[in-house]
């Protein structure tokens, strides 16, 4: 009897461990459909830009191949910030603690420069989405970081320039972080939505106090759990959850 209980306990532990390795699901909010993947701060969330040859990886497949040598793979991934034609990040970018692109503080054209913008930061044991000037003042020790914009939700408030009736709709993706910093939600809209609707999904649907826009037209998701493996032009920064292969 004890042996059976021990085996059952091991099965439950194994199942819980597998469930903890990222959870992807489909949701509907206010008439629009979304796909989201959730990660815990204790898990291995990384940003990817270049391969060992210093050339941009650009695709989910290339990232997966780069992980294979270490017996790892992607559980899920998405594009993680805006980039130039040569796929260099537009804003601040940190990988494995090394700064690869400087913080951009000034307003500018396009969505990135629609201040307040912000930074997604992976710390030791927590996540953060921080408005750019506040980030500049604090300079947290991010293991990985990507600057993008605009902020979708800032301390529970929607970006002040978002209009509920805006006709500017698109597929959009971004990231939100729970109040305690222990969970990150990576979201892509399955329907074209405006900024106001997308931000409300984070604030009112997922109950996160801070969220950041990653991009629009090029937004893509790799999430086998929900049957997603999006293709398109090569990307710049990619964020993903890394798990053991097999």
Image: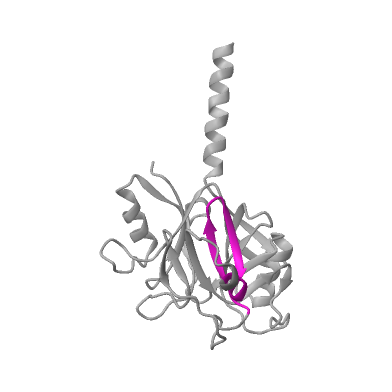
> Up-down: is 108 above or below 132?
below
Q: Residue at x 47, y 74 (%)?
A: 218
Across and down, in percent, residue 138 comes to 59, 67
Across and down, in percent, residue 193 comes to 63, 75
Across and down, in percent, residue 215 comes to 52, 74
Residue 127: within the magenta?
yes
Q: Is residue 40 left or right of residue 68?
A: right
Across and down, in percent, residue 124 comes to 53, 52
Looking at this view, name the residue that lies furthest to the bottom: 109
Between 188 and 214, the one lying in front of the other is: 214
User: Is residue 66 in sight in this rendering?
Assistant: yes
Between 193 and 80, the one lying in front of the other is: 80
Q: Is residue 48 left or right of residue 120?
A: left
Between 38 and 154, the one lying in front of the other is: 154
**For the magenta stretch, what is the residue range?**
116-135
Q: Residue at x 67, y 61 (%)?
A: 28
> Up-down: is 63 above or below 167?
above
């Amino acid at each position: 009897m004890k042996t059976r209980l021990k085996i059952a306990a091991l099965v439950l532990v194994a199942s819980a461990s597998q469930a903890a390795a990222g959870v992807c699901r489909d949701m509907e909010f206010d008439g629009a459909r979304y796909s989201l993947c959730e990660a815990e701060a204790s898990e291995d969330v990384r940003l990817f830009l270049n391969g060992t040859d210093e050339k941009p990886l650009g695709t989910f497949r290339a990232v997966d191949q780069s992980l294979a040598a270490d017996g790892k793979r992607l559980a899920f991934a998405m594009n993680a910030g805006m980039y130039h034609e040569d796929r260099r990040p537009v804003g601040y970018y940190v990988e494995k603690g090394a700064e690869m692109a400087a913080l951009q503080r000034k307003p500018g054209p396009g969505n990135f420069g629609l201040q307040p913008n912000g930074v997604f930061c992976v710390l030791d044991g927590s996540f953060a989405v921080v408005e750019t000037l506040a980030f500049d003042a604090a300079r947290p020790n991010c293991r990985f970081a990507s600057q993008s914009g605009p902020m979708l939700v800032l301390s529970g408030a929607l970006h002040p320039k978002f209009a509920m009736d805006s006709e500017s709709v698109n597929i959009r993706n971004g990231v939100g972080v729970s109040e305690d910093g222990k969970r990150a939600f990576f979201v892509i809209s399955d329907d074209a939505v405006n900024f106001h609707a997308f931000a409300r999904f984070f604030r009112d649907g997922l109950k996160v106090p801070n969220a950041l826009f990653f991009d629009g037209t090029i937004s893509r998701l790799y999430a086998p759990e929900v049957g997603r493996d999006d293709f398109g032009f090569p990307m710049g920064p990619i964020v993903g959850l890394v798990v053991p292969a097999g």
